[in-house]
Amino acid sequence: MPMAKSPLSPHSLLASLPGDECHCLVAYSGGLDSHVLLKLLCELRASGEFKGAVRAVHVHHGISESADVWVSHCQNTCTALSVPLETIYVNVNETGKGMEDAARQARLDAFELMIQEGEYLLTAHHLDDQIETILFRIIRGTGLRGLSGIRKQRPFGKGVLFRPLLEFSREALKTYAELELLSWVEDDSNTDTAIDRNYLRQIVLPQLEERWPGYRKNWQRLAHLAEDGQQLQLELGLQDLAVVQEKTYRISIPALLGFSLARQRNVLRSWFLYHEKINGLSAPDFYVGERILSEVIPAAEDAMPVVSWKKGQTSAEVRRYANKIYLRTVGLDDGLEDGLQDGLADEAADSLTWNPEQELELPWHMGKMVLIESENEGFAFPAGSLEIKFRKGGEKARPSGRKTRSLKKILQDYHVPPWLRDKVPLVYKEGELMAVGDLFICEPWQLEKEPSSGKKIYRIQWDRSDLHCGY
């Protein structure tokens, strides 16, 4: 009996690629899926239909006894296909989520180091991977975002992670590989049903296939509909966010409470997803969001609750203060790990010297300060250097036109959140307090610009638009 023709071909791959001249880095494990992807791409290149550069990367985890054999296989295959190959050796450190997850993260880290500006990292994820992912996420209690499955593309490092084979089943890949007489390596761990994904692949999905042969297409349609639903959620959430958000990292609680509970939940989700995309902040899971809704938002006005989470390499928190919720990242600098707060405070305790002709980078990721020309109120450009200190308690200040009061009370009046009050830069000139961050200038330093004088005056610009501040 003649072998069935595969629905997968170089031409069908070309239709799935981001372009016919893009530069591609193929994640090549040596297994069937990635070998098929690499071979198809090389056929397109040989025919002239694809004009972009092709190179490959193989990650050696050192977990399998066959790892060195796989390296040799990958090198021989790439040599035969005239594809440059780089093998990266990594150490896989188990972090509590299992070796499979740790190995995956090690691969991603290696790929991120390899990818070049504007390059596409091609991986061989296919339709069956998509189905496994959706089912696995359903078991874990996912939402629309999880139901939408694996994204075809997303920003990655200096380039883009792209999955051109998501519409094709593993059977289609295998048929193509057999027709082309390809050889590939088999990872022994793929048969270990103690691994959740293998259990789904080896035990659960074959039974679904036997009972409902067309379920893959139906679930593929579900993923597309879920992606549409997620996009609509995000669009509505961003519209609502514009109503409640006072600054990028701050939301008004009274404005948020003007929405239904479902829309409040969607606003928070959209807020986190925005910062995930723009700032790389990992969005929290559903349960963290529910804690914010049930613990932070309804708390008493004089309470200062906090909900924190850690996801990947990112730790973050949401705090409440003065009828607002604040989003900020946290880390070693905040003393949340290993008790380093005192040591870090000591580093800045002796003050910093600031040459006002240059910008100054502040400790604790608190941004930068620079002097800029002012159109109205400011101070004369200081001769010599300035001294930057931080509040230790007991300081007093006199904002221009006001009486002398404790700095603590003044910062409260300016609605500076408690967690930032000890990190507001205090600007001294010859031992006298000249300014408190960019909040106010002290007497007698403040001047008003006289239009006829032509004299320049300056003010402090404190760029604190950073998630470490949340302010």
Image (cartoon, rainbow, N blue to C red):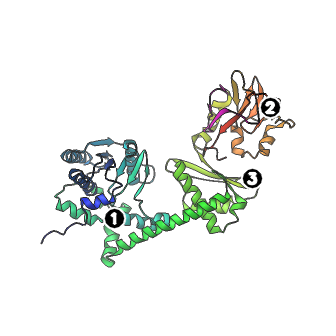
In percent of width and height, residue 83 lies at 24, 45
In percent of width and height, residue 270 lies at 57, 59
In what quadrant of the picture does the N terminus appear?
bottom left
In the picture, measured across the screen, residue 156 lies left or right of residue 339, that is left
For the residues labelled 1 and 2, the Cα–Cα distance comes to 69 Å
Residue furthest out toward the right: 403
Residue furthest out toward the left: 1
Q: Residue at x 43, y 46 (%)?
A: 157
In percent of width and height, residue 212 lies at 34, 78
In terms of secondary structure, where does tag 1 sit?
Answer: loop
Could you tell me the amino acid type at mark 2? Glu
Q: Residue at x 68, y 33 (%)?
A: 372
In the picture, measured across the screen, residue 191 lies left or right of residue 160, that is left
Q: Residue at x 50, y 47 (%)?
A: 313
In the picture, measured across the screen, residue 151 lies left or right of residue 448, that is left
Could you tell me the amino acid type at mark 1? Glu
Q: What label sits on residue 167 in the rendered view? A: 1
In percent of width and height, residue 205 lies at 34, 70
- Position of residue 141 relative to residue 457, above or below, is below
For the residues labelled 3 and 2, the Cα–Cα distance comes to 38 Å
Q: Which residues are magenta?
A: 352-376
Residue that carries the numbered disc 3 in the rendered image:
322
Q: Nearer the viewer, residue 169 or 137?
A: 169
Based on the picture, tell me whether residue 354 belongs to the magenta stretch: yes
Q: Nearer the viewer, mark 3 or mark 2?
A: 2
Residue that carries the numbered disc 2 in the rendered image:
450
Q: Are marks 3 and 1 in contact (CB under 8 Å)?
A: no
- The quadrant where residue 127 appears: bottom left
In terms of secondary structure, where does tag 2 sit?
Answer: loop
Based on the picture, tell me whether residue 385 belongs to the magenta stretch: no
For marks 3 and 1, the one nearer the N-term is: 1
- Position of residue 399 relative to residue 188, above or below, is above
